[in-house]
Image (tube, rainbow, N blue to C red):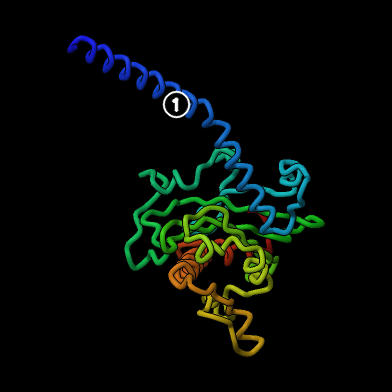
Amino acid sequence: MANESLKSFSSVLLLALICSGLVSGAAVGLRPLQQANERLDQKKNILRAAGLYREGEDVEQLFQAVDTRIIRLDDGSFVPKEEMNPDKFNQLKAAFDQETGDTLSKKDDPAGLTRLEKYSLVYLVRREGMVDTIILPIRGKGLWSTMYGYVALSADLSTIKGITFYKHGETPGLGGEIENPDWQEAWRGKKIHDQKGEVSLRVVKGKATGTPDELSYRLDGISGATLTMNGVNNLLTFWFGEHGFKPFLERYKKLGGKDV
């Protein structure tokens, strides 16, 4: 009886090991495909933010209108492509690398990032030789997760042309409504910085009210998703402030949009 039990146990153990090996092998084999799909989804969201995505058309072909660049976050300068290849740059990985990322102090980290990369991807769309749209990657803590998205700015570098959130773990039907196309459409035409250069755009609780000028800096909140909305406000404060894209936007404006 003991021998039979041992044989049964050995058989089950062997089967478990075989199944585990098959699952691990499948996961490893499918990883390149998953990564390719993730990159494709990111490109779709960049195009959506810029108003360039068209359902049914080839994403890679549409994305040829986008010039992907790398900037230094501390001074906003461009990194030459021969120095760093934008197609191979992993921004999130860079944040947690000792050479390419730094730890943020609590007072400098309203978005809850913990660490910040020294370099960032930016995406430029030109029209008649001039930069017409700049798309910037954003991320920050919501209620349950880190929210990832893109903000597209007009040539004035403050007016929003579009926004997308493409990855998060917020509550479906509440905070998860940050993916709602109608809510995202409401961002169009909103202003990020006031005339003093301060981040003034805010998602308010309930329906935004005020004068036409005030409403250009206010956006309706999502009912029942106060903490997620706080997270959106916090990531706006961070990414369009001194530690985020403000040095780049100010430098770019002074240079008249020249790629230097």
- Residue at position x 60%, y 85% from top? 214
- Where is residue 205 drawn, in percent x and y? 50, 79
The type of residue carrying mark 1 is Val
- Res 25 seen here: yes
Which image quadrant for residue 77? bottom right
Image spot of residue 79 (x, y percent):
56, 47
Seen at 59% across and 60% down, the residue is: 179
User: Regarding mark 1 in the picture, which secondary structure is present there?
Assistant: helix
Image point (52%, 31%), residue name: 31
Count the marks: how many? 1
- Residue lying at the far left in this picture: please name it: 2
Residue on which the image places disc 1: 23
Between 156 and 224, the one lying in front of the other is: 224
Q: Give the farthest residue toward the front.
A: 1
Identify which residue, 232 or 27, lies in the foreground: 27
Measured along the vertical axis of the image, is residue 168 above or below residue 242? above
Q: Is residue 257 left or right of residue 145?
A: right
Outermost residue to the top: 3
Q: Is residue 234 left or right of residue 132?
A: left
